[in-house]
Amino acid sequence: MRLASFLALASLATLGSTDVLDLGDLKQYNARTDVKAPTLSGNTIWLSGRDNEGYDVVLSPDTQAKARGILEGCGKADNKCYNDVRNFLQTSHVEIDGQLERRGFLQLLTKTFRKLGSVFGFIAAAMIADWQLRHNTQPPPLFVPHNMASSASKLSGATGLVISAQGTPVVTVTQTAAPTSLQGTQTPSVTPVTEPHDNFAKGDISVVLQSDFARRVDEIMHRMTNCEDGYKFDKGSTRRRKRVAGSYGKAICAAEAAAMMAQSGGALNDFVLMNPTQLPFSYTDSVAAVARAANIVNEFIREYAALVDISAELATQLSNVLFGLALRTIVDGTTLGENNRIPASLIKVSASPTGSHPSSTATGCPDPEKNPLTCGTGEKDDCKMRAPKKPGDSPVCDAGEHKDCECSAGVIWDIETVSDAQQKAMLAIAALHKKLGGGGKGDPKPGNNKPDCNPYDLSVIPSNVFRNPNAPEKNVYHHFCEKWYKESKLEMTVDAAGNNKKPEPHLKSVIKRTPPPDPSNWSKYDFNLSFKPAEGKKECAMDCKAAYALMSTACSNSGAMSVPMSKGGKLDVGCGVFDYSISEDKNIVPLKAQDRHCFAPDEFGKHRDIHPGSVSSYSGWPCTGTALKPVRRGDDSTFIKFKTTEDDVAYQYSVVWKQGCSLDSGVDAIYASNPLAIKDPGHTACQQTFIDNYKECLNGGIGGNIQIGCLVYEFKAQPA
């Protein structure tokens, strides 16, 4: 029977339409007993090897367990099973034997496997053959002989490739291309620092990362700080200064390790989507050790680029970015986050190659004249606006690839006719001001009708949202002023349309709610309004509406309409003091996914293996019927909770509406099968969201949670 199968396979190969990768006798892949891998954690693959010998491959316990779960869930050896295993392996952290010179090892991989993807493909092929022919679902350590490694290049871009072993066809595969799309929510970018802020100085560079992605990079770098390149560098350094966390040699190792995962479909996939022409930079010779270390990383990544098909331009930018991040977290001991500083003293920014407007290249920003960015208009903005810090400054993009780039907020100039009532108010102010001697500096004294506000501490709220000149009934303060009496203290928190955010039962039948001017932009902000009456009976220089109208202009940057207002201000009108402050309501959220929270690896103590197949299988139970019955705000009876136990491990799934949370759209019921309320989604997102809480958390499989809109999806595995 085996002979017949083999002859059939051989005849198929001779047709030329189908190629064959014959693994031969599987015993030749048994691990070498004299090779000892270090203790591995997380989702890791350890590689070692020497020219003309072969390669040693060891999977961490977590990687073995997850691969076993995929094999058990396959049912049969087919193309889907092969690609599922291969794609999973490609997301692993690749750790090269610390005793090897990494660049030499990369050259060896390139000479035999040709592409890094073929390494993962060959491991997947060997695992599936071992499972099918030797019924081994526990992926063992492997030794790949040199001659077999050379044949693995057939896997690169394979179409209809037959994989055989021990004279038996195992599976026919078509290798799917690695995904090149963004896996997170934000593409890594490099932006210039044009003004000092926080711990940044002018001239610094900020590497902007999505928070979950930054955590992953930080974890990988700290796990892999030992390598031959780093050891040689530190050993050869004649000057050694004390550092908070680690040496330049360890930073070299960390940057090189992270680079190994910066590939399409890899654990750090999003790095390959960076724009290599956005603010290209390099390291100066001012700190000789830094420049030498950066060159070592650069040489390594240039070798690596050939393995994963990334351009020389991207390889250079990737090298400088990763080394800068390694300096920050390994040498300086600062945990990586959303904004990561590379000091100006260490770098030089490449000059503009075209001689165009400086902001189009030297700063990494589009030309503000030819391709202006828009922000804060509430329409099709290019980015979220960050308000100017000083009068006369321009607004800039607050995040994303255009972070810190100048943007146009669409300032609207309003020309208004002063009414009789306003003229009377102005005359009254002038008379009172003269009577009281013009007031003084510092806190407003009674009768000092100059609004007190800080023009350097601005909100994102334009003054024409606070006071709408075209629709007074939509002013932020209109309802507050309807309730104002000069003899009584009054406090009210309102929304952008002036509606009281605290319930007023006696008004429900007569007050019609007016929607905010732009709910998507301003509904998450609270406007805290108050009036404190003065002691004794005193005249008011102006009424409530006139006072807030005056503050809306005086407390905005440059006093122009549609320009952001100060976060707070107050005005003494003689009979009392009007006050306002603007704050962000953290409980009002848009309908989008937030960052995933992963449990700490030791959060629930020691536990048995958590199987991917079980996580996937059980996730279907809590998702049953989620397209028929929505989860409702404040209604615990609609929340979803499911728990089952296997091998003394409790697998727990839940979907709840976060307490106190509100959607900015006002919707209070969402289907767990479609948390983003996509029209005709064509699939249910419930089960995949649970599975992603397992897959995306590098904590031994115990899971985590993610908030999408107001729904919180949690998968948690802990000892039963």
Image (spheres, rainbow, N blue to C red):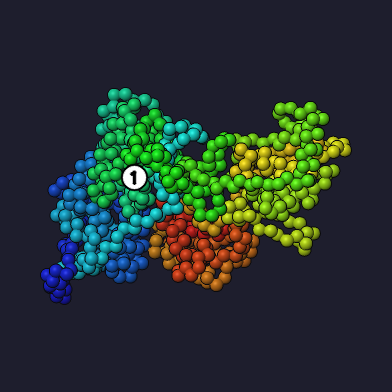
Local SS, label 1? loop
Residue nearer the viewer, 659 or 289: 289
Q: Is residue 24 left or right of residue 416?
A: left
Image quadrant occupied by the N terminus? bottom left
**Residue occupying the point 78% across, 46% down:** 420
Q: Position of residue 347 (x, y in %)?
A: 36, 32
Amino acid marked by disc 1: Pro
Q: Is residue 339 left or right of residue 96?
A: right
Q: Position of residue 393 (x, y in %)?
A: 54, 37
Residue nearer the viewer, 354 or 571: 354
Q: Quadrant of residue 232?
A: top left
**Residue occupying the point 40% across, 60% down:** 611
Question: Residue at label 1?
Answer: 276
Q: Position of residue 382 (x, y in %)?
A: 48, 50
**Residue occupying the point 17% across, 66% down:** 19
Q: Identify whether 171 is placed above or below 451.
A: below
Q: Position of residue 471 (x, y in %)?
A: 69, 54
